[in-house]
Image: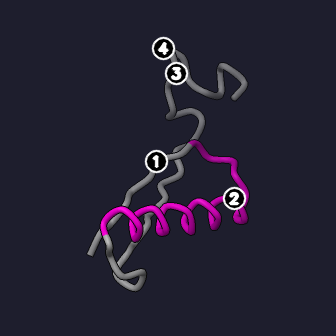
Amino acid sequence: MPIATINIMEGRDDAKKALLIEKVTEAICESLGAPIEAVRVIINEVPKTQFGIAGKTAKELGK
């Protein structure tokens, strides 16, 4: 059972996250030949205050 874990910064809407899950699932099925029923995708949303870019938080950078 392939499991993909994706860490993204908070703020994306449910439709975008659903599309991400769909596309990652398709990529796993195509590349590994895994049945779609076996694929799991986990999205972890990281708060902007806990996401660092170039030594600053994403919130500090206005991301």
Q: Nearer the viewer, residue 2 or 61?
A: 2
Q: Which of 43 and 61 is in front in this view?
A: 43
Discs 2, 4 touching: Cβ within 8 Å: no
Lower position in the chain sequence, tag 2 or tag 3? 2
Q: Which residue is drawn at 55% across and 63% down?
A: 23
Task: Label 4: state its secondary structure.
Answer: loop
Q: Mark 4 points at which residue?
A: 55
Q: Residue 16 bears which disc, if any? A: 2
In the image, residue 26 sits, relative to residue 51, either above or below, namely below
Region of the chain picked out in magenta, as a range = 9-32
Lower position in the chain sequence, tag 2 or tag 1? 1
Image side of residue 32 versus residue 22, left or right? left
What x and y, as percent, mark residue 21? 54, 65
Q: Which residue is drawn at 38% across and 57% down?
A: 5
Which-is-in-front pick, marks 1 and 4? 1
Q: Mark 1 points at which residue?
A: 7
What x and y, as percent, mark residue 38? 34, 81
Whether residue 12 appears in magenta in the rendering, the answer is yes
Q: Residue 53 bears which disc, if any? A: 3
